[in-house]
Image (cartoon, rainbow, N blue to C red):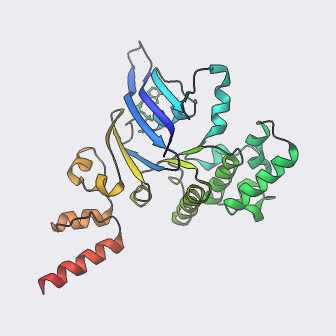
Amino acid sequence: MSKVLELKNLSYVYGTGTPFEKTAVNNLSLSIEKGEVIGIKGQTGSGKSTLVQMLNGLMKPTSGQVLLDGEDIWANPKDIRKIRFKVGMVFQNPDNQIVSSIVEEDVAFGVENLGVEPKEIRERVDNALKTVGMYEHRLKAPNKLSGGQKQRVAVAGIIAMKPMCIVLDEPTAMLDPSGRREVMNTVKKLNKEEGITIVLITHYMDEAVQADRVVVMDDGQIKLDDTPRNVFAKVDEIKALGLDVPQSTELVYRLGIKCENTVLNANECVDLLKKTLEAKR
Ligand code: ADP
């Protein structure tokens, strides 16, 4: 695998030299491989949003480097807008991301700024809408859509720009369970079928366990960085950082059942409980 993003000794300080000075990201280094899905977890205020806004140049690091495909994104500050086409961002509130009154115009907005030929814009917009399952809604007004549908339109606007990586900052926090499922299924599909690298900040356990890797942040630094199974095996450590583990993991932990592989979901939990009960018969 090759690295798509490499963060080297990255720091971000708010309000330097003021009484409110705050180091939000503190000398953090992280490599993200092409095609990976990375889940980022951490308490509110741990620096997650600040970190991801440095990935596409929305915020400039106080010190350190962000390398995209091996190149420092701030090498030519005038070109920083181009980075935003390569690393797309989806935010929490779908309403804040809508810029047009018709779905397909909204999806076209970013790609129009890329200077792509009109015929190709049409193709890219149609394909993006089909990929997120919103093609039949292309002529609707975005404000007539559900939260999950609006987020899928936001994702379509980004994939129309053919990015290398999509960063999602709690994209499902304002959605109902079906909206959450829609968005997560779309994100997984993009990763599997298009090979797009995904960086996902999420508070939801069921979303974090679907990642290839979970990075746990605390006070601007990375405390854990491993597969979901290895991260959530460290129940005491996770709780000490003010975070939860998946409910199934918690149940097995509280029952004191020892198992080789940490349980991450209800099915695995049921299997383990059955085996444990059978062994006691
Ligand atoms: P998270 O996304 O994990 O909740 P943030 O990156 O939003 O964390 O915040 C990290 C730290 O930086 C927090 O202590 C927060 O209060 C502080 N912070 C965030 N935005 C600002 C800002 N605009 N001005 C000053 N401090 C900020």
Tally of marks: 0
Q: Is 20 drawn above or below residue 151 in the view shown?
A: above
| Residue 93 to residue 264: above or below | above
Q: Is residue 12 left or right of residue 186?
A: left
Left or right side of 80 for 226: left
Point out residue 48 in the picture as x, y percentages from the top left corner: 43, 38
| Residue 7 place in picture, x, y as percent | 45, 32
| Residue 99 in sight from this viewpoint | yes
In this view, the residue farthest toward the top is: 17
- The residue at 64%/26% (across/down) is 80
Vertical comparison of 27 with 147: above or below: above
- Give the answer, above or below, for where 104 lies relative to 135: above
> Left or right of 30: which side holds 118?
right
Task: Give whichever of 118, 91 is nearer the camera.
Answer: 118
Position of 194 with respect to 42 (left or right) is: right
Percent of width and height locating residue 124: 77, 51
Residue that lies at the very extreme toward the front in this rendered image: 1
Ligand 1, seen in the image, is in the quarter at top left
Residue 103 percent coordinates (x, y): 76, 53
Q: Would residue 90 be visible to someone looking at this image?
A: no
In which image quadrant can residue 109 be found?
A: top right
Q: Residue at x 64, y 51 (%)?
A: 155
Where the C terminus falls, by quadrant?
bottom left
Residue at 51% from the left image edge and 37% from the top image edge: 5
Q: Nearer the viewer, residue 74 or 99?
A: 74
Q: Residue furthest left?
A: 280
